[in-house]
Image (cartoon, grey):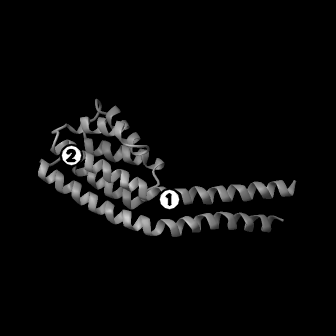
């Protein structure tokens, strides 16, 4: 019975380590998804002259999860929305659990949300380019740290499980 408990502890800690490693692996891809979303917002607003709500509806269909969930929830709140930037921040925070991104990534997107729809098209383009530049910096950092932290998280998960098993036996 002791060995069965030890096996459960080892499997659980290993699973946690691999789950954390998966978040490190997914982060660069999700940053790229957000960059694509910003570029699509720019294209729709500048070239199609679409409204912000129309852009959100299109993005909720086009983008892959988890980013599409965010835009889908924005469109669901369209009728009750009085302040788009507050809705943007609230929905980002609500859906952030599904992302593998960091707090600094969240701060960049919240900052962008405070400016979206507040300026004319040229200023909006500048804000999108600035946000894209910040996300590029975050992407470079995520790529550099991804492989290192991914291996570390897996190793710590397995080794912590072994430590707990050794201490309990």
Q: CA distance from mark 1 to mark 2?
A: 29 Å
Residue at the image position 29 percent from the left and 31 percent from the top = 80
Drawn side of residue 33 relative to residue 153, left or right: left
Q: Which mark is residue 164?
A: none
Q: Residue furthest top?
A: 79
Q: Which residue is mark 2?
A: 43
Residue at the image position 48 percent from the left and 55 percent from the top = 26
Could you say where residue 150 lies in the image, as x and y percent from the top left? 54, 64
The crowd level at tag 1 (other Cα within 10 Å; few <14, some 14-19, many 20+) is some
* Mark 1 vs 2: CB contact within 8 A: no
Q: Which mark is residue 25?
A: 1
**Closer to the camera in the image, 28 or 79:** 28
Q: Secondary structure at mark 1?
A: helix
**Which quadrant holds residue 167?**
bottom right
The tally of labels here is 2
The answer to whether one can see residue 4 in this image is: yes
Residue at the image position 43 percent from the left and 45 percent from the top = 66
Q: Secondary structure at mark 2?
A: helix
The crowd level at tag 2 (other Cα within 10 Å; few <14, some 14-19, many 20+) is some
Q: Quadrant of the C terminus?
A: bottom right
**Closer to the camera in the image, 112 or 152:** 152
Residue at the image position 20 percent from the left and 55 percent from the top = 127
Could you say where residue 84 lies in the image, as x and y percent from the top left? 26, 41
Could you say where residue 119 lies in the image, as x and y percent from the top left? 14, 49
The answer to whether one can see residue 82 in this image is: no
Q: Along the polypeptide, which appears first: circle 1 or circle 2?
A: 1
Could you say where residue 64 lies in the image, as x and y percent from the top left? 41, 43
């Amino acid at each position: 019975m002791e060995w069965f408990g030890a096996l459960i502890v080892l499997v659980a800690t290993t699973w946690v380590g691999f789950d954390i490693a998966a978040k490190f692996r997914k982060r660069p891809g999700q940053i790229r998804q957000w960059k694509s979303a910003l570029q699509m917002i720019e294209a729709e607003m500048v070239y199609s002259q679409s409204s912000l709500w129309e852009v959100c509806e299109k993005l909720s269909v086009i983008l892959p999860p988890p980013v599409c969930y965010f835009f889908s929830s924005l469109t669901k709140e369209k009728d009750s929305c009085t302040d788009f930037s507050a809705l943007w921040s609230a929905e980002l925070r609500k859906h952030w659990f599904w992302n593998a991104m960091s707090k600094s990534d969240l701060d960049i997107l919240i900052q962008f949300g405070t400016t979206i729809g507040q300026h004319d098209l040229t200023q909006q383009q500048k804000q999108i380019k600035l946000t894209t530049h910040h996300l590029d910096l975050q992407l470079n950092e995520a790529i550099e740290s991804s492989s290192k932290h991914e291996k570390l998280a897996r190793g710590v998960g397995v080794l912590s499980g072994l430590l707990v098993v050794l201490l309990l036996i």
